[in-house]
Image: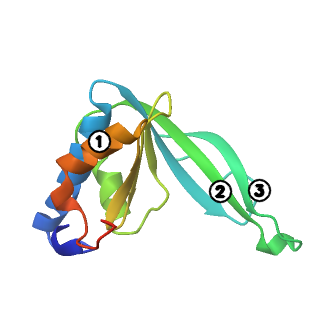
Amino acid sequence: MPESKRYAEDEGEYAAVLGRYNMILDELFAGGDVYVITPVWTTEAEVPPSQPEAGYWQSLLVEDGPDPEFRTYCHLFADRRPWQHGCLDELLRDVADDKVAGVLVTDTQVRRIHHPYDGGADVFLTTPGERDLLRHRHADWLSSHPSGL
């Protein structure tokens, strides 16, 4: 958000956050299908019930400590859908509010990845040139910190 504000406080600010997320997602994925990957973190190896729109993909053992009570599993769910502007607004709003974390949106070849989080997003692109063009188009969105982060 403007002035590197992290959390929206009113509907106008939510509109700005969702507008920015959707603008980038449109630039990356318009006219194609995407995978929406959502994680569920547990201390159990068993897969939790499926997300309403996503199917189970895989589970990862994140912390393999000697004590089973301190093991952490990341269960990944994936949903393939045609990209449409605004189709993820409910999920993106939850991300912006830090209710959901670790969401990835990617093309079906996993060449471009959008990782939204509360306060911003990381975008992974195929080439430095593609990265630089996207950064230049949205330079006014970057933090005033010298690194842009």
Circle 1 or circle 3, nearest the eye:
1
Residue at point 39% right, 41% down?
128
Residue at point 21% right, 44% down?
23
Disc 1 from disc 3: Cα separation: 33 Å
* Mark earlier in primary sequence (1, 3): 1
For mark 1, does the 10 Å Cα neighbourhood hold few (<14), some (14 to 19), or many (20 or more) residues?
many
Residue that carries the numbered disc 2 in the rendered image? 74
Position in image of residue 64 (x %, y %): 81, 64
In this view, the residue farthest toward the top is: 31
Vertical relation: 116 (above or below) 127: below
* Mark earlier in primary sequence (1, 2): 1
Q: Is residue 99 left or right of residue 67?
A: left
Position in image of residue 74 (x %, y %): 65, 56
Label 1 is placed on what type of residue? Answer: Leu
Q: Quadrant of the C terminus?
A: bottom left
Residue that carries the numbered disc 3 in the rendered image? 45
